[in-house]
Image: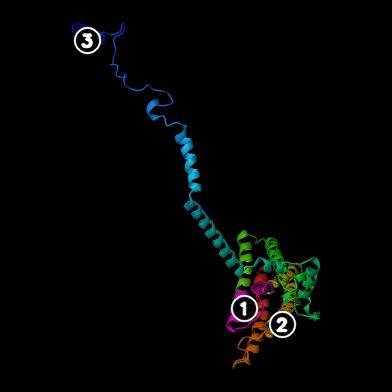
Amino acid sequence: MAHQHQGHRATKQRARTAPPGDPLLFDDTSSGVPPMNNQNYYESGYNMGPGVMGGQGTGGVNNLFADPMANAAMMYGSSLANQGKDIVNKEISRFMSVNKLKYFFAVDTKYVAKKLMLLMFPYTHQDWEVRYHRDSPLPPRHDVNAPDLYIPSMAFITYILLAGMALGIQKRFSPEVLGLCASTALVWVIIEVLVMLLSLYLLTVHTDLSTFDLVAYSGYKYVGMIFTVLCGLLFGSDGYFVALAWCSCALMFFIVRSLKMKILSSLSSDALGAGASAKPRLRLYITVASAVFQPIIIYWLTAHLVR
């Protein structure tokens, strides 16, 4: 008992004794707290180890790809994307087929020269029928009667450049006026094609004329417009009206002879009915009206460029 009492007293005495030196400002209460580290705070309590951040994250990704439900969802999403792509391609091909568009640009230098001569001097041409090979029309480079989009597109660009030059010579050029000329010329072609399609639909005329064909026949007027503006710039108003008369007559003759085989000879589904006698006459009116409308557009789009 004496020894135990002395040991207790000695322990208590040592606890009260302070180390030599300056007195402590705060009591030392860090005896039961884990040691601090500069990088790993409370290393014993918060050390996750490399397996938690690296191994578990990689394992989660692997488990995600190994999950059959995730794979099924990914396959279903990719199939939906492919179906949507096919639907979009089908809808685009309904209105604009790439293969059909390539057909209208299958031209060469020889064809372009013959076609330009045919547009300016159509009176000597005899055979206006489009040639076919295995129920498909020959490309333009093999048949001068086939419609194309190369000449209308190049003529449209040339017309815009020529209009800018004419406005510049007259000191009336501005980007707004040039843009107005281009948009007006394009809108007239769109209106003409829409009216033609609506007329053929209302009369139930079944023909092989496509929208590209109508755009091509409507765009050939730009060739006459270029010639008319050039004559007006070189020879004044007299030269302009002479060129306008020549190009208008040539274009009307060309349109009537070109559309004759496609519209007048086509038979509608009700051609044998009560209105059979009126159908050919109405088709003739459509053909003539589309031809007569060309000089009006040519004059409207070129008269302001020549003064």
Q: Nearer the viewer, mark 2 or mark 1?
A: 2
Any mark on residue 8, and which? 3
In the image, 78 versus 202, the foreground residue is: 78
Work out whether mark 2 precedes mark 1 in sequence or the reverse, and give the earlier one.
Answer: 1
In the image, 105 versus 158, the foreground residue is: 105
Q: Is residue 5 left or right of residue 307?
A: left
Work out whether mark 3 precedes mark 1 in sequence or the reverse, and give the earlier one.
Answer: 3
Q: Check disc 3 and give the amino acid type.
A: His
Whether residue 195 is in magenta: the answer is: yes
Evaluate whether residue 42 shows in this view.
no
Whether residue 103 is in magenta: the answer is: no
Q: Residue 238's x, y, as percent?
A: 74, 74
> Residue at (63%, 82%) from the top-left corner?
206
Q: How many marks?
A: 3
Q: Which residue is mark 2?
A: 261
Q: Which residue is mark 1?
A: 196
Q: Is residue 139 left or right of residue 296?
A: right
Residue 133: name its quadrant. bottom right
Label 2, label 3: how far apart the Cα atoms are: 128 Å
- Dot 1 lies on which element? helix
Evaluate whether residue 302 shows in this view.
yes
Q: Residue 209's x, y, as percent?
A: 66, 77
Q: Say if 26 sits above or below 177 in the image.
A: above
